[in-house]
Amino acid sequence: MIVLASLVLTTDGQRVFFFGDPLPGFCGFKSFFGFRCPGCGLTRSFVYSARFHFVDAFHAHPLGPVGFLMVLGQIPWRLRKRRIALKP
């Protein structure tokens, strides 16, 4: 689902959009403490990674491209495991 969402969402570098409508950019951590949380920028990084813009993805969040590739790598592995589990 994360990979599919990354393909549907777009970003302008500051905000994330769903079919042209901006998503709310609320971060409770930032609102409470006044600075970015460790996860700030991950959504934008995943959106950039889904479009193979890995430099922009790295600038949005340094661990975003790695996380995206890890999630993407899970898909074939999990499909294979599921197919093995379904065999009689």
Image (spheres, helix red, strand yellow):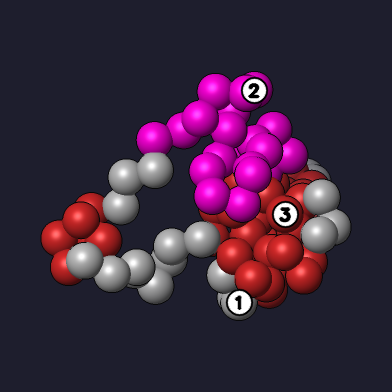
Asked if the residue at tag 1 contacts the one at tag 2, i.e. Cβ–Cβ closer than 8 Å, the answer is no
Label 2, secondary structure: give it: loop
- 3 and 1 marks in contact (CB < 8 Å): no
Label total for image: 3
The amino acid at mark 1 is: Pro
- The mark nearer the N terminus, 3 or 1, is 3
* Amino acid at the residue labelled 2: Phe
Q: Is mark 1 on a helix, strand or loop?
A: loop
Q: Which residue is drawn at 64% across and 44% down?
A: 12
Tell me where the magenta segment starts and ends, as one range.
5-24
Which residue is labeled 3 in the image?
48
Q: From this viewpoint, is residue 72 visible?
A: no
Can residue 44 be found in the magenta stretch? no
Q: Which residue is drawn at 67% across and 49% down?
A: 47
Mark 1 = which residue?
62
Q: Determine which of the numbered discs, if any, sits on residue 19 in the image.
A: 2
Q: Position of residue 62 (x, y in %)?
A: 60, 77
In percent of width and height, residue 45 lies at: 63, 59
Tag 3: residue type? Tyr
Q: Quadrant of the C terminus?
A: top right
Q: How far apart are marks 3 and 2 (CA)?
A: 16 Å
Question: Is residue 66 in sight in this rendering?
Answer: yes
**Which residue: 59% across, 28% down?**
18
Q: Distance between the residues labelled 3 and 1?
A: 12 Å
Quick one: 83 or 30, which is closer to the camera? Answer: 30
Give the quadrant of residue 84: bottom right
Percent position (x, y) of residue 52? 84, 57
Bin the neighbour count of mark 3 within 10 Å (Cα to Cα): few under 14, some 14-19, many 20 and up. Answer: many
Q: Which of marks 3 and 2 is nearer the N terminus?
A: 2
